[in-house]
Image (spheres, rainbow, N blue to C red):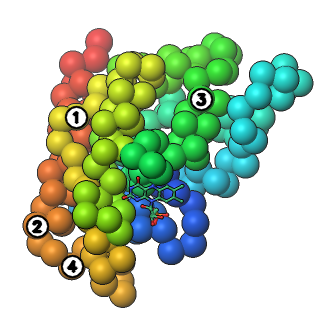
């Protein structure tokens, strides 16, 4: 039997009560049901400062090395990303800018090498009508162009997010649950195929 796909799941907002954190939780449950090995990552817990070359020159923050290690040890990444002014949130940009900086170290690839060619999936949630879908256009570009990740074509954007989840954190509408399932399954299927094809 093939080894299970190792999936890193993170939200682009760390605030208490974040809808995207809830959506990441939904996706993590779906992925576990599909037999993936899931790590739920709190990007805020990495404690990364705003990227600054002087900070880097003084020593790579441990959070950047930790994110590189996590990316290197997983097959795929799933992000539940809010949009801020139709754009990617600073938490995501800053975290992955830092992750792109570490150089090759022993058995560990560079930060960019830990991401290049890995599969990524994108979800979003917002109280607005479009559910953060506009930000995903920019996130797709960031992940695929800058970080060389293979972003699956399916996305799921949960609009009216303030009424979309029940008390247990589950999505109330079957249509939205199914959209999330499609993204998660596509990420797992693509990552499994790449693993199977690896030399
Ligand atoms: C600076 C800022 C800009 C925002 N811009 C948008 C936007 O362009 N579109 C949108 O749907 N919501 C926007 N929002 C509202 C967020 O979608 C809302 O705060 C959402 O709850 C954030 O996600 P979270 O619940 O995961 O923290 C913005 C919020 C902030 C703080």
**SS at mark 2 in the image:** helix
Q: Quadrant of ligand 1?
A: bottom left
* Residue 199 point in image, percent of width and height: 29, 12
Image depth: mark 3 or mark 1 in front: 3
Label 4 with label 3: CB-CB less than 8 Å: no
Classify mark 4: helix, strand or loop: loop
Image coordinates for residue 153, horizontal then vertical, percent: 18, 35
Secondary structure under the numbered disc 1 in the rendered image:
strand
Visible in this render: residue 118? no
Residue underneath mark 3: 97
Residue 139 lies in what quarter of the image?
A: top left
User: Do the residues bearing badges 3 and 1 touch, measured as CB atoms within 8 Å?
Assistant: no
> Is tag 2's residue or tag 1's residue first in the polypeptide sequence?
1
Q: Quadrant of the N terminus?
A: top left
Q: Earlier in the sequence, mark 3 or mark 2?
A: 3
- x and y, in percent, of residue 113 in the image: 50, 17
Q: Which mark is residue 172?
A: 4
Instruction: Identify the residue shown where x is 67% and y is 47%.
Output: 46
Determine the secondary structure under disc 3: helix
Identify the image quadrant of residue 122: top left
User: Distance of mark 4 from mark 3, alpha carbons?
Assistant: 35 Å
Residue 152, disc: 1
Q: Earlier in the sequence, mark 4 or mark 1?
A: 1
Q: Residue at x 34, y 61 (%)?
A: 125
Q: Residues within 10 Å of mark 2 (few under 14, many from 20)?
A: few
Q: Residue furthest front?
A: 85
Q: Earlier in the sequence, mark 3 or mark 1?
A: 3
| Residue 33, numbered label | none
Q: Which mark is residue 175?
A: 2
Vertical arrangement, residue 107 with respect to residue 135, above or below: above
């Amino acid at each position: 039997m093939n080894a299970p796909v190792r999936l890193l799941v993170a939200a682009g907002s760390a605030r208490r009560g974040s809808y995207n954190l809830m959506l990441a939780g939904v996706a993590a449950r779906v992925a576990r049901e599909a037999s993936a090995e899931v790590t739920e990552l709190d990007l805020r817990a990495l404690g990364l400062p705003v990227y600054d070359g002087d900070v880097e020159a003084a020593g790579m923050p441990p959070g950047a090395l930790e994110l590189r290690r996590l990316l290197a040890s997983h097959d795929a990444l799933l992000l539940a990303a809010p949009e801020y002014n139709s754009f990617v949130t600073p938490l995501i940009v800053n975290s992955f800018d830092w992750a792109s900086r570490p150089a090759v170290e022993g058995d560990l690839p560079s930060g960019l090498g830990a991401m290049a060619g890995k599969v990524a999936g994108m979800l979003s949630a917002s109280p607005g009508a479009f559910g953060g879908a506009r930000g995903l256009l920019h996130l797709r570009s960031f992940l695929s162009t800058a970080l060389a990740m293979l972003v699956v074509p399916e996305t799921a954007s949960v609009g009216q997010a303030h009424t979309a989840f029940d008390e247990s954190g589950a999505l109330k509408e079957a249509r939205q649950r199914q959209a999330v399932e499609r993204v998660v399954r596509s990420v797992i299927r693509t990552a499994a195929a790449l693993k199977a094809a690896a030399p």
